[in-house]
Amino acid sequence: MTVRAIEWDPATDRLRLLDQTKLPGESVHLDIKSVDALVDAIAILAVRGAPALGVAGAMGVVTALDEGAERGWSADEVLEAVDRIAAARPTAVNLAWGVDQVRGLIDQGRDAVLEAARRVAVEDEAANRELSRLGADWLLARVDRPRLRVLTHCNAGALATAGWGTALGLVRELASRDRLELVYADETRPLLQGARLTAYELAQEGIPHVVQVDGAAASTILRGLVDCAIVGSDRIAANGDVANKIGTVAVALACREAGVPFVVAAPWSTVDLATASGEDIEIEERSGVEVTSYAGVRVAPAGSEGFNPAFDVTPARMVSAIVTERGVVEPATGQRMIEEG
Ligand code: MRU
């Protein structure tokens, strides 16, 4: 039983989020009563991770319909609110994709939209379980060790999805086959998704892990301490370029130098065939204060500004494998993402 980050709560008939800004210290839930509240929750990363954002986008359309009914919004005002949800963060394609999965059903009424939004969540979890199996098969056919030592960056677990997880789903799959030795979880500055969330999930499941600073990752890989890196993604371009949490490209560079597989695990909903290459992906830039402060306390001198791109793009030539529920693509060999997967 994995942790549930997002669900439609039958008791309140509202969207319910596990507030990830409070983890691992406190397990607090947010009942989302308005579009503003949802957009805020997305902006502060109370709900986060590309697939979970997809579900938030789809279920958020129901929130917009409910608020519209309460406040007497016109059809255009509802659509405007829906657009605000889709644009709350720019890099993860899943957010707008999730909205688009249900937007066309608005004319059929709230129940039809809610049913479709729930389906987005169910299908995401099923996709994660399938890609985890395929990814484990791919890795175990290539790495000759009884148990694998895996490095991961950011959090691509149950918390970042509708359930199970992508990169951490694959880790879970390896653990369930008794083929996992140790996970190196990058802490993932500045918001510590690795130290707070990945470590939380691994600890809950009793999976052996250590947390390392982001700056240790390349050295850990070059010292031969890991057999592969497995990460999630926020958007995969048609040519196999991969956007993911800032710091991911450094992991990929080190893997290439060390000759160990760099694997991206993501549902097909993260693949954006309309985006030709990584150059066309908008990279979210967040407040510099997240960098110049630590735990709310300023650490950089008053005159220093922060630079805070939230994501980077790993070029396809450094990506050994992209694993989706449709199969495995090997961009480093020149393979591209195509409709059939
Ligand atoms: O800023 P975040 O925490 O939303 O960034 C999340 C990531 O970069 C994840 O690796 C990605 O969304 C994949 S989650 C399965």
Image (cartoon, rainbow, N blue to C red):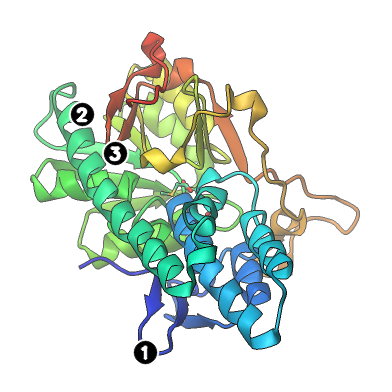
**Residue situated in front as seen by the camera: 299 or 114:** 114
Furthest residue in direction front, as rendered: 108
x and y, in percent, of residue 47 in the image: 51, 65
**Residue situated in front as seen by the camera: 58 or 111:** 111
- Quarter of the figure that contains the C terminus: top left
Q: Which mark is drawn over residue 11?
A: 1
Instruction: Please name the residue shown 40% across and 17% down the image.
Output: 331
Q: Which mark is drawn over residue 139?
A: 2
Relative to 215, is 2 above or below?
Answer: below
Name the residue beneath numbered marker 3: 150
Residue type pointed to by label 3: Val
Q: Ligand 1 closer than 8 Å to the CB at disc 3?
A: no
**Residue situated in front as seen by the camera: 108 or 118:** 108
Relative to 256, is 181 above or below?
Answer: below
Asked if residue 162 shows in the view, the reply is no
- Quarter of the figure that contains the N terminus: bottom left
Drawn side of residue 278 relative to residue 195, left or right: right
Residue type pointed to by label 2: Leu
Asked if residue 34 shows in the view, the reply is yes
- Callout 1: SS: loop
